[in-house]
Image (tube, rainbow, N blue to C red):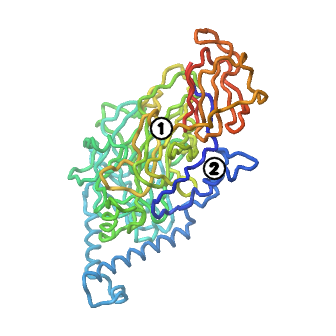
Amino acid sequence: RRSRTCCAGSKRPTRRREVGTSLHSGALARLSRLRTGRDRGAERWAPDEELAAMSQFARLTSPPQRRADARAEEAREDDELLVDNYLEQGTSLNKDEIRSQGLPGLSLLVSLALVFLVLPGLVGLLYFPAGSSENSRPLPADKSSKSESDGHGSPTTAAGDSEEDVCGLGTDDSRFCLVLRTTSLPHPRQGENLATYGPFTVTEPGVIESFLPLANMTYIHHLIVFKHDKLEARAPGFGNRVPPEIWRSPDRVIYAWARTGQTTPLRFDTSPGTGVFVGQFTDVRGLYLNIHFEIPEELVNPAESGQISLDLGIALTIRKLAAPVAKSWHDCVASPNGTHRSCPGGQGLAVQILDEHTFKLKPHSPRETVVHLCRTTQDATIYAYRNHAHTAGRQFTTRLFRDGIDIGMVLNRSVQDAQVFYEAPAGGIEIFRGDVIRFECNFDTSDRDYQTEVGADLSRGQEMCNQYLMYYPISLTKDSLFCRRISPWLGIPHLTHAPEPFETPQDQGLPSSADLGQVSATAVSSNGETVYAFARRHNNFLSTSLIEEPTIFALNASDGSVESAFAQGTFVAPHGLYCDPAGFLWATD
């Protein structure tokens, strides 16, 4: 039985690791000091203090002017790289002459690329030239399409979209807007529907910097974008089966959104210098839309053509990337020996899902907890995160462990907040290879008189326990999973020892031997500061009645004094005791 936290204030390991240059080096340095004994003079560190300290650090998101400056600097650096690559091929011109005359053949290549993108029927890719001076103009969520579908769910554009800039680029010609969209859903059924639409082929190399869902908020409640590393010749549609290696892999998602906590779809912008690399020389050559939607009875009419009109899709703002830069980036992230933290073109982002799919929740319970544990396979930085559950979901938390030591709670958010990506605190959470991530989902089933099962069906009250971690650097090596699931019992092997022999003075609050009874087990907190004793009091191994007195005593490891006593009216025959590095005390009766 879980009794209470035992490991608050755990120390970080003293071992140093060489992890290369990070965009956020030192982001957790102050937190490390906060968690060590050097800063604990009069008061102990607590999780709330940690979160408060994290919020003091500068976030990656910049004000509009700083964002524009950063993007201009990126364009200048890409231009420098192109010029250098051209010079390496041999020329009599110097850099200034190349800039004034332009790269030979480049204008022609760009022109051909743009013509290719706007060819009619190009497997569903819609290219929208910049035409608005506004910085951002989200498409109204319930805007109906004024154009005709081809009857098979082909992507179409509502009348007027070519005039208004869906992505809000204004006059910025260094980026383009890619809209993956359909206005027709074939063969829907009443109630919950789950459909996948694609593939959308991506040819031109670039970096996705912004995601804007185009969803009817009345019916669409969940949208996921999957990536595929192979080019497919099929035209996009609902009849195309998604390759099993995509939907079975937790690392094939690049974006996810749900309507919870929003009246209109919220847009997610990455920070300057980061984004999802797509197109040639990347692992994103095709995209699939996974859509969860619910259809009321009045919209399903068997007498009609078997389809309904429902606007859905996503608009992607993509920064253009020259082919040589994309090739250099690919070679950098594919290198098994590189740190991947300073590759040309920017920092590539990847996403992995942490999900539990075998739990069941008891009815009439104010708190049901589900836990997922995984071990990281590479050094990385968690850049952003998104939680997902349905109506019973409450607080979702994420803790980090290093060498068996509880580093602390790094993420903490109610799943009833807007279910969009949020940038991680402190400008990013630094992760080392071998760290253990503990993701915890809490649910409230007080108003339910049935057992809650896992699933996507809202009408049946099903629930989910998912967390999407967006991180960098992306790795194109064979082991692409950022965090591999592990067993809860094998995940954090760790034991901490107290000085032996351990003595408790009689005048420090511990009951007499006769009152204490048999001490069946002891345990030590992971920080080594507390020793726990499990006592049977006046009961024995064959007793059948509850012990009304406290059965667990928390003793100060340095002087043996009793800090607290608890767990009365809980146990009959106390037996085993274990304190895990996650901060929980486990007892067997």
Residue 451 % position (x, y): 48, 21
> Is residue 561 shown above or below 417?
above
> Who's the residue at 48% across and 37% down the image?
493
Q: Which residue is mark 2?
A: 35
Pointer 2 local density, CA inside 10 Å: few below 14, some 14–19, many at least 20: many
Q: Is residue 267 visible?
A: no
Determine which quarter of the picture holds residue 562.
top right
**Residue in the image at 35% along x and 31% along y:** 189
The amino acid pointed to by label 2 is: Arg
The location of residue 489, given as percent across then percent down, is 46, 32
Q: Is residue 150 left or right of residue 499?
A: left
Coordinates of residue 160 in the picture (x, y in percent): 40, 59
Describe residue 471's horizontal placement relative to residue 201 as left or right.
right
Q: Is residue 112 visible?
A: yes
Which of 414 and 140 lies nearest the eye of the viewer? Answer: 414
Q: Secondary structure at mark 2?
A: helix
Frontmost residue, 332 versus 3:
3
Q: Nearer the viewer, mark 2 or mark 1?
A: 1
**Sequence order check: which comes first, mark 2 or mark 1?**
2
In terms of depth relative to the viewer, which is nearer, 111 or 340?
A: 340
Image quarter of the N terminus? top right
Element type at mark 1: loop
* Badge 1 density bin: few <14, some 14–19, many ≥20, Cα 10 Å: few
> Which residue carries the number 1 mark?
493
Marks 2 and 1 sit apart, C-alpha to C-alpha, by 21 Å
